[in-house]
Image: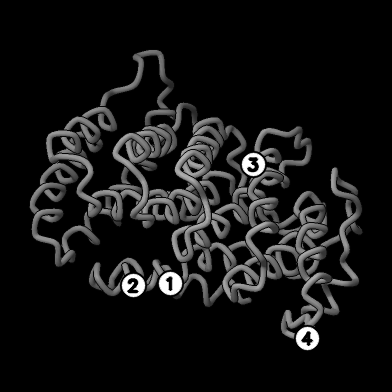
Amino acid sequence: MMRQHSRAILAAALVLPAMAWANAISETGSSFVTMFASSGGGAGGGAAAAGGACPAPALREAKSAKWQIDDDARRQSLALQSLACLRSPNPLERDELAFEALQAWMRADKLDTATVQELRTRLSAQLTAPDPQGFGRPFAALVLADVARVDRIKPYLSAEQRAQLVGTAADYLRNVRDYRGFDEKQGWRHGVAHAADVMLQLSLNPALTRAEHEQMLAAIASQVAPPGEHFYRYGEGERLMAPVFYLSRAKTLECSDWDGWFAKLAAAPAASATRQAALARKHNLKSFLQPLYLNISESKDEAQRGCLKPLILRTLKQAAE
């Protein structure tokens, strides 16, 4: 996976007509993340986790075989064992072995329902588990995006389980406070972007309800321009806007609901905010609103375009004040 290629894909996503972009994202989903998260090399060995040590040698062997493992039982077992790698300090183990393996197997329908359900359970728990180095939670979210994708492609969750997944993902996104992105030696963390990828897969799932969409939108809004002085630098705005684009096509919310959502997004922060925080807020809002405006403008959905385009323009003007 090449990071330069990922940048080209994102650049194309921001200029392609919305329908073409919709087709690309619905088929690739967190593939954008896969390539963003690749790191090449890194120090450190296999990390111990709740599920044991990272099975790096077995994963390297599987990767050399293009993730083809004929023994089904061994593949199911290795998939679960690979979760230990998601907390590894070695970016190669996290990204190019564990995540690549899990995504490849889920997208090729090589994991049975019991295994995917177990992945959902363990990954959901990892989103709230202690994470002193800051890798475990973001990478749990990254894999959980593909767990959510399996359900929208080939439904396996009950309505209650799907609601739990929405709640878990929304809680994680809302509570992210580690805004680190890429480190040359340690690789990626990228919690906000990875949580947004779960939201993207959920936004494409027709089984979700209005209440679940509202829960997702509240979580997204909380991170578009979070309090404090952090400036997003790693494409977080584009990642957050993608599920909003699709939620606005789902027709579960009225235009008046979107009016209220954007009005809250534009609401001025407390007067006690620092000048640096005000600059960060303006930057982060624009990083979200501008690509959303571009894609809404190119949308073939007249109702979506007619409702959201003026609301986004209004919010952009308010953000510039």
Depth check: give the residue in front, 314 or 45.
45
Q: Amino acid at mark 2?
A: Asn
Q: Amino acid at mark 3?
A: Ser
Tell me the number on the disc at residue 124. 3
Q: Cβ–Cβ below 8 Å for labels 1 and 2? A: yes
Q: From the image, tell me which residue sits under label 1.
A: 27
Residue 287 visible somewhere in the drawing: no
* View extreme (bottom): residue: 65
Residue drawn 85% across and 43% down? 50
Mark 1 and mark 4: Cα distance apart in space: 24 Å
Q: Amino acid at mark 4?
A: Ala
Mark 3 and mark 4: Cα distance apart in space: 30 Å
Q: Cβ–Cβ below 8 Å for labels 2 and 4? A: no
Q: Amino acid at mark 1?
A: Glu
Depth check: give the residue in front, 52 or 162.
162
**Residue 134 x %, y %:** 72, 41
Q: Cβ–Cβ below 8 Å for labels 3 and 4? A: no
Figure quadrant of residue 91: bottom right
Query: Dot 2 surroundings within 10 Å: few (below 14), some, or many (20 or more)?
Result: few
Tell me the number on the disc at residue 65. 4
Residue drawn 86% across and 46% down? 49
Residue drawn 36% across and 51% down? 207
**Secondary structure of residue under mark 4:** loop
Seen in the image, is 102 located left or right of residue 154? right
Residue 282 visible somewhere in the drawing: yes
Mark 2 and mark 3: Cα distance apart in space: 28 Å
Residue drawn 49% across and 35% down? 167
Query: Dot 3 surroundings within 10 Å: few (below 14), some, or many (20 or more)?
Result: many
Q: Earlier in the sequence, mark 2 or mark 3?
A: 2
Q: Earlier in the sequence, mark 2 or mark 4?
A: 2
Q: From the image, tell me which residue sits under label 2.
A: 23
